[in-house]
Amino acid sequence: MIKSLRHEYGNKGQGHRNNPLIPFVLIIVLAAAIFTFYNLGTPPVELDNRLCPKTGARGATILLLDTSDPLTSKHKEELGRLAKLISSEDSDKHESDDGNSFRIDVGELFVVYELRQDPGSPELLIEVCRPQKSPSSRTWRDDIRQGSRFAKKEWESFEKALENLFPQSGGKPQPSSPILETIAVISARHAPGKRGNREFETHLIIFSDMMQNTDLLSHYRTYPEAKAVRQVAPDLLTDLTGVSVSLFFLKRTDPQNPKLQDKKHYYWWTELVMEQGGKIINQEIL
């Protein structure tokens, strides 16, 4: 009798050990535990009032907008095109026609300055970081990490900031155009420089007719070659080491000076950026 009971219960125990579903169930439970721990155990990145990570922005795109002469309808249209490239929601960086990237990444700072007569005080129009994702591209996994209500609020703040990309006045004629002086001020604020963090990527975009016009140097008068500026007017130069530069030349119609924005002027800026340690990645005439 005892022997038969041992035989019966022994077979049942053996059956449990040989059940093929047990390893499969254990794998599912383990995978679910790891997934839950990863998602719930990874808190959302804390942001400051600019929507930037409190640990610091991961890079910067700076746009200098020159309205010392009013923007034409075409220029405003091109500025709108640039704004779409910068704020693109594509998962990969959106590229211009020649393959150069303009889309700002998550956690990257986007700053827009408007040129002013006082180069030390350019008008700050936008200073905001790109949040994680737009509401339309979020998944249920994203909602686990951060509630959709908070994400929507962040994205709306980002979109609202981008509305300031277009100056209210559209610009008005100004007696001077301190482009070089303003670039020096902006680069001192945002560019890494020779001694800075080279992993911090900086992209400087200049949307301007590129007609420098101050007492130190004016493109409306005879001006030195790019390589001679360091000797003639060293205060106009800055350190653009590690900075990628995109130049958008706004073509102006000046019947009295039709050749001011000629080929020489175009390549003068190319050489001057290189003289300061910068790298031209995009150059267009609009």
Image: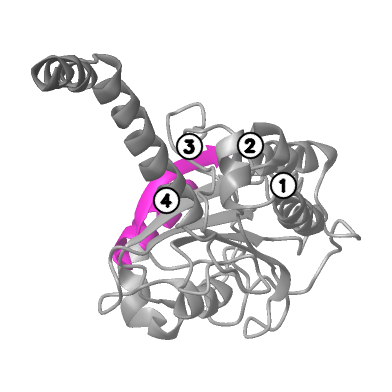
Identify which amino acid the numbered label 2 is placed on. Answer: Arg
Rendered-image quadrant of the N terminus: top left
Nearer to us of marks 1 and 3 is 1
Identify which amino acid the numbered label 3 is placed on. Answer: Lys
Using the numbered discs, state the Cα–Cα distance from disc 4 to disc 2 in whole angstroms. Answer: 20 Å
Identify which amino acid the numbered label 1 is placed on. Answer: Ser
Q: Give the image location of residue 84, x and y in percent.
A: 68, 38
Q: Secondary structure at mark 4?
A: helix
Q: Secondary structure at mark 2?
A: loop
Name the residue rendered at 34%, 25% in the picture: 25
State the residue position of label 3.
93
Q: Is residue 276 magenta?
A: yes
State yes or no: discs 2 and 1 in contact (Cβ < 8 Å).
yes
Q: Earlier in the sequence, mark 2 or mark 1?
A: 2
Q: Which mark is residue 138?
A: 2
Is 202 placed above or below 49 here?
above
State yes or no: discs 1 and 4 in contact (Cβ < 8 Å).
no
Q: Residue furthest front?
A: 1
| 244, 147: nearer the viewer | 147
Is 70 placed above or below 94 here?
below
State the residue position of label 4.
37
Using the numbered discs, state the Cα–Cα distance from disc 3 to disc 4 in whole angstroms. Answer: 30 Å
Q: Give the image location of residue 78, x and y in percent.
A: 71, 38
Q: Give the magenta-colored segment's residue range.
A: 266-286
State the residue position of label 1.
148
State yes or no: discs 2 and 3 in contact (Cβ < 8 Å).
no
Q: Secondary structure at mark 3?
A: loop
Q: Give the image location of residue 247, x and y in percent.
A: 52, 49
Is 240 placed above or below 209 here?
below
Nearer to us of marks 2 and 3 is 2
Q: How busy is the neighbourhood of tag 1: few (under 14 within 10 Å), some, or many (20 plus)? A: some
